[in-house]
Amino acid sequence: MFSGNRKLLGKINTLTLVAITIATVALTVLMPTMNGTPLLVPSTVAQEEEEKSGDLTEPEDNAPFGGSNAGTFSIGPDKYGLRVQVDMSDSPTNGTIYVAWLVDNSTGDDIGIGQLVDDELAATQQITNSSLYNLIEVTEESPDAVGTSRNQSAIVAGAEI
């Protein structure tokens, strides 16, 4: 009689441990969303892209690139989107800042990546289709004049991606 109860008790303990494990895993995954914070899901689009890097050059002959070397860039997949790094060789003029942009050369559409701090930028953007952007550009602008679109007359460096 007792050996049957022990087997049953052993099965119940095993099932209890399995249920606790499943509950713990489920709560670990769902906990960030329970506090109103969305659960971040890695971008599958960004994972398909390849790392691209090169020199940023000054504008030349009506193109936003092609002149003297002005810095470097690196663009590649990141766990949460597209990682962009920019490093300018020189500091901006006093009272101005550098701002990095991804640009679709065929349409002129752009997306601001961010302001460079100490002539550098490292940012991750959640972009659904980064293949639309074929240029990276850096503008030099007054901090109060930076808008949602780049100032094409303020381009100081660029490169084809």
Image (tube, rainbow, N blue to C red):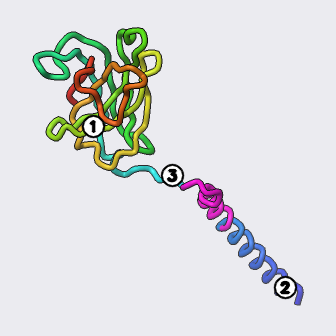
Q: Are marks 1 and 2 in contact (CB under 8 Å)?
A: no
Q: Which residue is the extreme one toward the left?
A: 61
Query: Which amino acid, mark 2?
Result: Asn
Q: CA distance from mark 3 to mark 1?
A: 25 Å
Q: Give the labeled residue for mark 1.
A: 110
Whether residue 7 is visible, yes or no, is: yes
Q: Nearer the viewer, mark 3 or mark 2?
A: 3
Query: Magenta residues?
Result: 23-38
* Percent coordinates x, y for residue 45 in the rendering: 33, 49
| Residue 81 image-quadrant placement | top left
Query: Which amino acid, mark 3?
Result: Leu
Query: Which amino acid, mark 1?
Result: Asp
Q: Is residue 105 above or below residue 144?
A: below
Which residue: 54% across, 55% down? 39
Q: How would you rate the neighbour count of disc 1 (Cα within 10 Å): few for under 14, some for 14-19, many for 20 or more?
A: some
Instruction: Say the numbered circle drawn on residue 40.
Output: 3
Q: How would you rate the neighbour count of disc 2 (Cα within 10 Å): few for under 14, some for 14-19, many for 20 or more?
A: few
Whether residue 55 is visible, yes or no, is: no
Q: Is residue 150 above or below residue 109?
A: above
Q: Quadrant for the N terminus, please.
A: bottom right
Residue nearest the observer in this picture, 139 or 14 = 139
In the structure shown, which secondary structural element does the residue marked by tag 1 occupy?
strand
* Percent coordinates x, y for residue 127 in the rendering: 35, 45
Q: Is residue 110 above or below residue 26?
A: above
Q: Quadrant for the C terminus, please.
A: top left
Which residue: 39% across, 35% down? 83
Which residue: 37% across, 51% down? 44
Q: Is residue 154 left or right of residue 37?
A: left
Q: Give the labeled residue for mark 2.
A: 5
Q: Which residue is the extreme one toward the right?
A: 2
